[in-house]
Image (tube, rainbow, N blue to C red):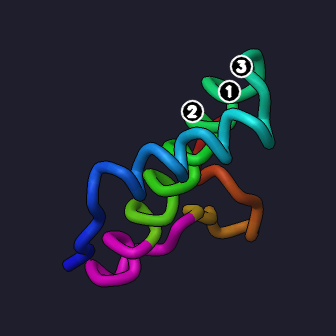
Amino acid sequence: MFDFSYSEIIVVALVALVLFGSDKLPEAARSLGRTFNAFKSGLREAAEGKPAVEEDVTGKPGGNKR
């Protein structure tokens, strides 16, 4: 699907390192991974026809938790 060479990947990694710094880069990658995971989960739930947030009969989010 994507055809990246090693030199292009290295350039992107260096640009990310310069933009975020060595301290924030792991945090940014973790946040990006969680965002992609939530997006995939939302797509999967939409395909199955399930709501993303369950609501009980009173209309409050969270289902029947008391």
Q: How many labels does the image show?
A: 3
Q: Which residue is drawn at 59% across and 63% down?
A: 53
For label 2, the SS is helix
The C terminus: image quadrant? top right
Spatial CA distance of label 3 from label 2 is 14 Å
Spatial CA distance of label 1 from label 3 is 10 Å
Q: Which residue is drawn at 62% across and 62% down?
A: 56
Q: Mark 1 points at which residue?
A: 27
Q: What residue type is labelled 2?
A: Arg
Marks 1/2 in contact by CB < 8 Å: the verdict is yes
31 on left or right of 20: left
6 on left or right of 32: left
Magenta stretch: residue 51 in it?
yes
Q: Name the residue under label 2.
A: 30
Q: Mark 3 points at which residue?
A: 22
Q: Which amino acid does label 1 sit on?
A: Glu
Residue 26 drawn at (x, y percent): 61, 24
For label 3, the SS is helix
Residue 3 drawn at (x, y percent): 23, 72
